[in-house]
Image: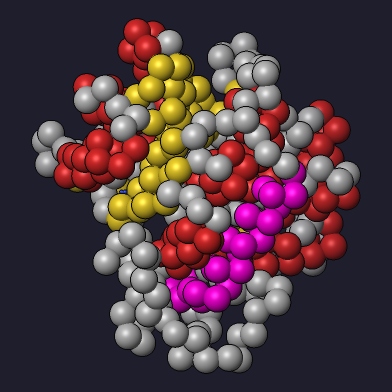
Amino acid sequence: MIIEPRTRGFICLTSHPTGCEQNVKDQIAYVQSKGKIEGAKKVLVIGASTGFGLASRITSAFGSDAATIGVFFDKPATEGKPGSPGFYNTAAFEKEATKAGLYAKSINGDAFSNEIKEQVVNLIKQDLGQIDLVIYSLASPVRTHPVSGKRFKSVLKPIGEVFTNKTVDFHTGKVSEISINPAEGDDVANTVTVMGGEDWKMWIDALQAENLLSEGATTVAYSYIGPEVTKPVYRNGTIGAAKDDLEATAFSISEALKSIGGKAYVSVNKALVTQASSAIPVIPLYISLLYKIMKAKGIHEGCIEQIQRLYSERLFGGDVALDEKGRIRVDDWEMREDVQAEIAELWQKATTENLSEIGDLEGYSKEFFKLFGFKVDGVDYDAQVNEVVTIPSIQ
Ligand SMILES: NC(=O)c1ccc[n+]([C@@H]2O[C@H](COP(=O)([O-])OP(=O)(O)OC[C@H]3O[C@@H](n4cnc5c(N)ncnc54)[C@H](O)[C@@H]3O)[C@@H](O)[C@H]2O)c1
């Protein structure tokens, strides 16, 4: 079939298998161009099909020749109906990994559930014995708790008071003001239950209980801080409370891993266009200004550049370099004083009329479509494509 983008707000309902495959190939080529990393050899990535998790899986496999198991929650294609991008990404990843002689298996299902944890435990026992590195990169709006069976929903709201600021509809370029009402009831607790550290700890406990983590095993989860302008809705908001919880969980996991000389880290990453971040009000305007400034300074990075740097210069680079709160920082270039000073200035000025000039709205929009395999250089979108793609290890 011929597949075209069909968007509804910040989601795209279709995705393109050839474009997704090309994205994966481009990321692999980038990692290979940077040379080998003396890193982990057996890697589990939870949230492995898009964004930072996919970049982590690619960097592990093609930077360090690692065997990888990837867990994600994606929709397979059916005849006439494209699958979700993570499904196509993973199909492409497995194909390339197999070509390169690398072990790669994938599990598609709810990572929050006991069943999926059990499947992963069995797969490790059967194929890899033990894991050296666990990347935790889930971004989900909901979680069904495995003990209570209760379904929790996360929200993106400020805490305490109404937050009013500028935002942009990145499809139309219209800059407008929005007001977001503060969290109420159980909003904060629910968001912490979905995006906090409890599930990360449950994964590590499940692996450790079966002795599936090797001596010195490391685990890393991803966090975000960001600038003043997004603070009320991000870091000081409901999602920030979840990130505080995630960051605190790193210490309790490190404590639990002491017996095997292991360590848990949180890496604070840069703001990037992903499916998760497009959904957060105000952030798209910030990102479009940020991209413009970082590109002009020659310090722009995407997911793959971020993770390649995280691995080569921090995790496996001899100096993990933690901040005062014990976190790895690869948002260091985003948070540079000169970058943030320019953001603050442009933020005041940004309007519908000037955003395409002072911001990188075009770059934002292109990145958004690229997430779904559209607008990828070198892909012929007029060509017929087979939408029903399978992931080799999932039959
Ligand atoms: N995007 C950013 O700007 C940014 C910046 C810093 C940190 N982070 C953090 O990085 C992490 C990953 O975010 P992302 O932006 O790469 O998100 P993403 O939406 O691109 O990826 C999320 C992944 O989680 C998987 N997933 C979601 N729910 C699942 C479930 N129930 N079971 C199994 N898999 C599930 C998806 O399939 C996908 O592989 C998050 O913790 C996020 O907060 C993001």
Looking at the image, what colour scheme do you see?
Answer: secondary structure
Quadrant position of the C terminus in the picture: bottom left
Q: Give the residue drawn at x 77%, y 47%.
A: 300
Say which of 133 and 137 sits in front. Answer: 133
Q: Quadrant of residue 323?
A: top right
Instruction: Give the quarter of the image for residue 43.
Output: top left
Q: Position of residue 358 (x, y in %)?
A: 84, 57
Region of the chain picked out in magenta, as a range: 11-34
Q: In this rendering, would 92 be left or right of 389?
A: right
Q: From the viewer's perspective, is residue 232 above or below residue 211?
A: below
- Check residue 29 for magenta coloring: yes
Query: Furthest residue to the left?
Result: 148
Question: Residue 394: x percent and y percent?
Answer: 30, 62
Q: Is residue 190 visible?
A: no
Q: Residue 137, relative to residue 228: is it above or below?
A: below
Q: Is residue 164 magenta?
A: no
Which residue sits at x=79%, y=30%? 336
Q: In the depicted view, which residue is nearer to us: 288 or 51?
A: 51
Q: Considering only vertical position in the picture, is 154 above or below 372?
A: above
Write down the quadrant of residue 42 in the picture. top left
Report the residue at 79% width, 57% height from top.
359
Where does residue 268 sit, x and y in percent of width and height?
Answer: 58, 30
